[in-house]
Amino acid sequence: MVCPHMRSPRNNARATGPLRLRNDVKRSGNRDPSPGPLGRWSVRPFRNSLSGIDPDGRYRRELGAMTPKIARFLAEQAPATPCLVVDVDRVEARYQSLRAALPLARIYYAVKANPAPAILRRLVSLGSAFDAASWEEIRLCLAAGAAGADISFGNTVKKASAIAQAHQAGVTMFAFDSIEELEKLARHAPGSRVYCRLIVENEGAEWPLSRKFGTTLDSARDLMLRARDMGLDPYGLSFHVGSQQTSTDAYEAAIARVGMLFTDLAAAGLNLRMVNLGGGFPIRYREDVPEIDRFAVAISHAMTEHFGNDLPEMIVEPGRFIVGDAGVVSSEVVLVTRRGQQDGPRWVYLDIGRFGGLAETEGESIRYGIRTPHDGSPAGRVAIAGPTCDGADIMYEKAPYALPLDLACGDRIELLSTGAYVSTYCSTSFNGFAPLTEHYI
Ligand SMILES: Cc1ncc(COP(=O)(O)O)c(C=O)c1O
C-alpha cells in the first residue's frame, strides 16, 4: 500500500494532507508563468481552430508540413507513389524547439515513430538519446552511432533474449510494469537502472495508450522496493499521457501521481532520481493544438509544485512531435465515384490506405490534412479509402472531409504531417501492394 501518512521530505506543500491526488493539479494552461527552478516560460495563446473548407465552399489549402524542400523535391523528382518524403532539417528544427522549451529535460527520441537511419543519424549528431521498443530498434540506434548508455529500453514487454542483447550492448536503463518483467531484468540485465511505468489518465489524447501499459501507485511502490531487493537500481518512474495529447492537464495530473510516489518511497528509504514524462506532445493536423511552450509551462509548474527545488532528472520521449510534421505522403488518386445516391459523398480511393501505412486513421483518430492540385476551387464532401479489397480499408467516412470537385483519377495529392507512425505501420504486401517508398532529404 502507498502509505497515506507519508510526507515529502522535500516539499512542504505536500505535507498538508494525505497522499491523495490534489484537485488543484487539474488547473488548465493559460496562466502566468512564475519563476522556479525551471525558469520563466513564454506562453502563446491558442490559435482558432480551422476547418477544411471556407465559408464559400472552397477547399482551403492546409497549413504546415509542406516544407519548401519537400515541395521542391516532389515538383522536380515526381517520385513514384505512394511515397513518404521527410525533410530531415525539419526534424532537427523540431528537436531544437523542444530542447529550447524544456531545457532541463533530456530528449529520448521514440524510435518507433520513425526509425529511418537518416533521422537517427541526425539526432545522434544533435546529442539526442533514444527510447527503443525492441532489440531491433536498439540495433538501429547503435548503427546510427548512439552509445548504449544513451538508449532506454522503454517497452515494458520484452523478450528475455532482447534484454540480454541490450545489456550486452551497453544499454543500462529499462522500463517495466510487472513483477514478471522485473524478474527477467534481474536475470538478464543485472544491476541495471530500472523505472516503473504508472497508469495515468489518457483523456485528451487522440491516440490513447492507456489500458495496455502501466501499473497502479500501490503496485509500483511494491515493485520498486522489490527491484532494490533483486539487485537492480530502482531509478525512477514513467508515464505516457497518450499520443497526440492535446491537454496540458494530463501532464500535470500525472506528475502529481509521480510526486506522491517519490515521497512515499523516500520515506521507505528509496530515493528515486528520475521522472520519465513520456511522449504525447501533439502536432497540428487539421486543427490547432497548444504550442509546445504551453506544455513546457504546465510541466514546469507541476514539477516545481511537487518536487520543489529538489528536481529529479527529467526525461521526455517524443516521437510524433519530432518527426510528424517533417513528412509528407505523396499519393495518386485511383478512383473518384459516387456510391448509389447522388446526394451521398463522393468516394475518393487513393493508392495508400490503412494497410499502406495510414493505420492511425483507425477510428478516424488522426485526421491528416490533404493538399490537391485543385485547392481553392469549389469542393464537396468526400469519403476517403485505400486501394485494397478489405472493407476496413477506409480512412475517413464520418470526419468532415471535403475535396475539390475537379479531383480526378490520376491526380497526385499530398497527405500532410505523415512523418510519424506511417512508414513502419505499412504492411509488406497486402493485396500485392508494395510498401510505400521513403525519401529522406
Ligand atoms: C513508451 C513510449 N514512449 C514514447 C512514445 C512516443 O509517443 P509520441 O509519439 O506520442 O510522442 C510512445 C508511443 O507509443 C511510447 O509507447
Image (cartoon, rainbow, N blue to C red):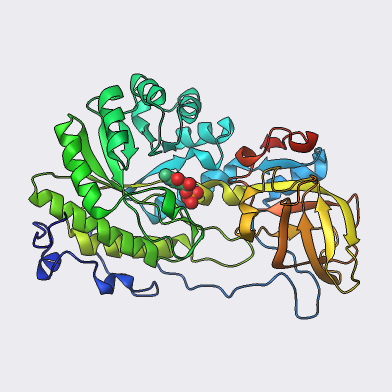
Quadrant hosting residue 425 = top right
Q: Position of residue 91 (x, y in %)?
A: 55, 44
Q: Position of residue 291 (x, y in %)?
A: 48, 63
Q: Does residue 48 lie above or below 390 as drawn? A: below
| Quadrant position of the N terminus in the picture | bottom left
> Which residue appears farthest toward the top when viewing the image?
168
Viewer-closest of 363 and 267? 363
Please give left or right for residue 422 compared with residue 129 in the image: right
Q: What residue is drawn where x is 77% and y is 42%?
A: 82
Q: Is residue 128 visible?
A: no
Q: What residue is drawn where x is 78% and y is 62%?
A: 383
Please give left or right for residue 347 compared with residue 270 in the image: right
| Quadrant position of the C terminus in the picture | top right
Q: Is residue 46 visible?
A: yes
Q: Position of residue 386 (x, y in %)?
A: 77, 49
Quadrant hosting residue 177 = top left
Please give left or right for residue 256 compared with residue 143 in the image: left
Viewer-closest of 203 and 405? 203
Q: What residue is drawn where x is 29% and y is 44%?
A: 196
Q: Does residue 316 lie above or below 123 as drawn? A: below
Q: How many marks can you see?
A: 0
Q: Position of residue 298 (x, y in %)?
A: 35, 65
